Amino acid sequence: MKTPGKHFQESRLDAIPPIFRDPHQRLLYNFYPPPPITFPVTDGEIEQFPRFFSMKTVDGLKHRFRKRRSLYRQWSREVASNARRPGRGKHIFVLKPETMNRLLDAMESIQSAGSANAQEALWAMYFQGKNFDEIELVISKKTITRLLIRAERIVGVIPEDAPEGLTIGIPTIKLSYQMLRCGRDGIFDIQQYFRGRVF
C-alpha cells in the first residue's frame, strides 16, 4: 500500500468526479467555476453519498444538479450553524486536503506501534469517506484520536485566533470529507459557511 500521507499528491486532482461523468452533468461541471478548495477524486471512494439518504434518492440526485446543489448547500449551512451554538461544535471544522496530508506525515514521524494503522484509517475516512467500521484494521478509535491529537500538536493546525475550544477528532475527519464532497459534487464554496473554521 502507498504511504497515506503521499496520496494527495498522487491523486488525480484534475479527474472529473463520477457524478459529473454523465454528458449532461459534464456540461454543468464545465459551466460552473470550480470551488476554491480542490478535493481529489480517490479510488475506492464511497458511492452512497450522503449516507443518510436512500440509494434511490442518491441515484436521483446524480441527474439533478440544481436539486443536489441546493440540498448540499442547505446541509452545509445547517452543520455550520449548529457548530456555532453555545456548548457545541468543538470538533466541527474543515481540514483542507493539504492540511490532512501534513497531519498524516506528522503521524508517520510518531514512534508508536499503531501509527501506521492510524494513518491508513484516517486516510480512508478523509479521502474515501469510509466509516470506522468499514476499515479492516486492528486499531481502536481511542488510539486513532490520541495519535491524531499528537499529530495536530506537531503541525499546529488549529491557529490561536480560532474559535475557543476547538479539538481535533475523528468527527472532524468525517465532517471534512462530507463537506468537501458537498462542495465538489455541488460546485460551491463551503468556506462561506465555515468562516474561521477551515484550516
Image (cartoon, rainbow, N blue to C red):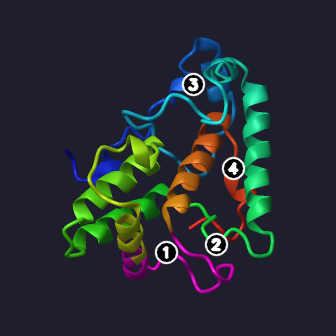
- Number of marks present in the image shown: 4
Residue range in magenta is: 150-168
- Which tag, 4 or 2, sits closer to the chain's start? 2
Indicate which label's residue lies in the foreground, 2 or 1: 2
- Which quarter of the figure has residue 29? top right
Indicate which label's residue lies in the foreground, 4 or 2: 2
Please tell me the numbered disc located at residue 189: 4
Task: Identify the amino acid type marked 2.
Answer: Lys
Report crowding for label 3: few under 14, some 14 to 19, many 20 or more residues within 10 A (C-alpha): some
Q: CA–CA distance between discs 4 and 1?
A: 21 Å
- Which tag, 3 or 4, sits closer to the chain's start? 3
Per the image, the residue denoted by label 3 is 19
Element on which disc 2 rests: loop
- Which tag, 2 or 1, sits closer to the chain's start? 2
Please tell me the numbered disc located at residue 60: none
Element on which disc 1 rests: loop
